[in-house]
Amino acid sequence: MTRASAPGFPEAQVRQRAREGVAAVFAPLETYGDQLFGAGADQPPAPDGIADDLDRAVVAPPVFMPRRLEKLIDLGREPLHDDVDLATVIGGFSSPLPVYVSAFGSTRAAGADTGIAVSRQAGRLGIPMVIGENLVPVTGYRRSEKDRSPILERLRAYAGECPPGLGGVVVQQSTEDADSEVWNLVYSDPSVAGLLDSGRLGFELKTGQGAKPGLGGMTVVDPAEAARLDTRFAVRELPGTGGWLRCATPGTFTEEILRQQVRFMRNNFPRARVWVKFHPGRDVAAAAVTAWRAGSDAVTVDGAQGGTGWAPRAFLGRAGLTLGECLRRIGAPEGCLLASGRIWEGGRAVRALAMGATAVGLGRAALLAVDEDPEHGLIRLVEALALEARMLISAVGKYHSRLLDREDLWWPAPTAQPHPVDDPTVPTLERTP
């Protein structure tokens, strides 16, 4: 029989699925724990006509800068980029920079040493940090000094380095975490009292994540681990690979359920800050407003470019709104808005701030930086981002990140036309005879 061919059709992918079945839905199992997944150059291109507004946007400095004049008068000299103030309040926590470390939970890529190294450096920087879901259901909660669980190790590493009055730790909880009563355990733990008493402890309700919106967390486990976790998670065999999927549920939310959940958090943990994290859903604006009006201190939006330790290939860059579209739909935020998704340098960070975000989250970038240098990698990465942010913000004639606005951005379009001569937005200059 002659081997069939199909030019122009994804023949190789079809043949792979014919050989491997459901295992081909994911990346090769041997990459789990080493490769960080999410939208990027190694993923299929986005559909024609779809682009992230943040990638298209250009920072557009004006010529006339009245706020630079205000700063000049204030300083008594010409201002420089060093004069840009980046200090802000992120979800109730004072931070020297509009940056925080995003959640990564029980995935192997954020394993013990990496998670602790990130915690130490985030603490040293004094920026807030989120501890992700499913650590306690997977590894347990042990308070003994010699055998502490990973969640307590991360909390202790952060608290041991963080300067007084800065930063804060936010502990995420999903459905399986709620079954393990994670928030109750942390809130009542004497070893966490220092963070709680200083107002630097928060809890985040996770309703979804950017890389796989609408799905719960996923990791790869071996058969023995699958058997151990079978009573707490859904576990599914990946035939022909020797691996199993550990699947968390995404949780079920309506407007009323979300509102009641936020009120429950405020009532039961009155000394903790309340954050809510959303995946890039099409109704993200309504969800954000619901959370703010129910009393959330911060709303986190994770764009479809967000990273993860493991996700189906069909989701990566192909499901959910881009971060720029999320920010556009939310518009002027009613409260503290946090944005994450492929943030690693000052340019994308400044564009997100100009579109309404109070701060930006580092996920994959934080893990890679610590992988490069466990002692100083994240600190250097954040210092570089801060320098770029200061230079870009000063270039538009402003000297605090909260003063950024959409007027500071320009979106080039192929059909863009120059201003007509009678455009009323163009001032008429007196002509010299």
Image (cartoon, grey):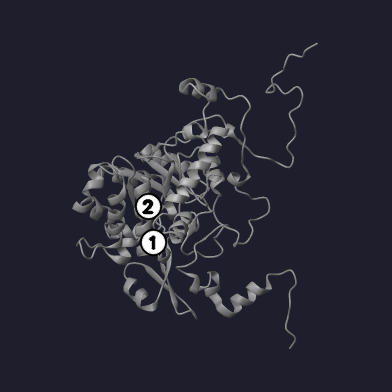
Of the numbered discs 1 and 2, the one sitting upstream in the chain is 1
Q: Is residue 399 visible?
A: yes
Do residues under tags 1 and 2 come within 8 Å of each other at their CB atoms? no
Q: Residue at x 42, y 41 (%)?
A: 97
Q: Residue 89: horizontal and vertical position, in percent?
A: 38, 37
Asked if 217 appears above or below 327 in the picture, the reply is below
Instruction: Using the image, determine if residue 312 lies above or below residue 381.
Output: below
Quadrant of residue 66 in the image? top right
Asked if residue 182 lies left or right of residue 352, the reply is left
Check residue 114 in the rendering and tell me which mark sits there, or answer none.
Answer: 1
Q: With 407 as the anchor, is 85 left or right in this view?
A: left
* Residue at the extreme top of the image, as rendered: 433
x then y, percent, for residue 181: 26, 57
Q: Is residue 204 visible?
A: no
* Dot label at residue 351: none
Q: Quadrant of the N terminus?
A: bottom right
- Amino acid type, callout 1: Thr
Residue 18 or residue 370, whichever sits in front? 370
Q: Is residue 266 left or right of residue 353?
A: left
Give the residue type that dot 2 points to: Gln
**Residue at the disc numbered 2:** 121
Indicate the quadrant where residue 179 lies.
bottom left
Q: Secondary structure at mark 1?
A: helix
Estimate the spatial distance between the alpha carbons at disc 1 and disc 2, rounded to whole Å. 11 Å
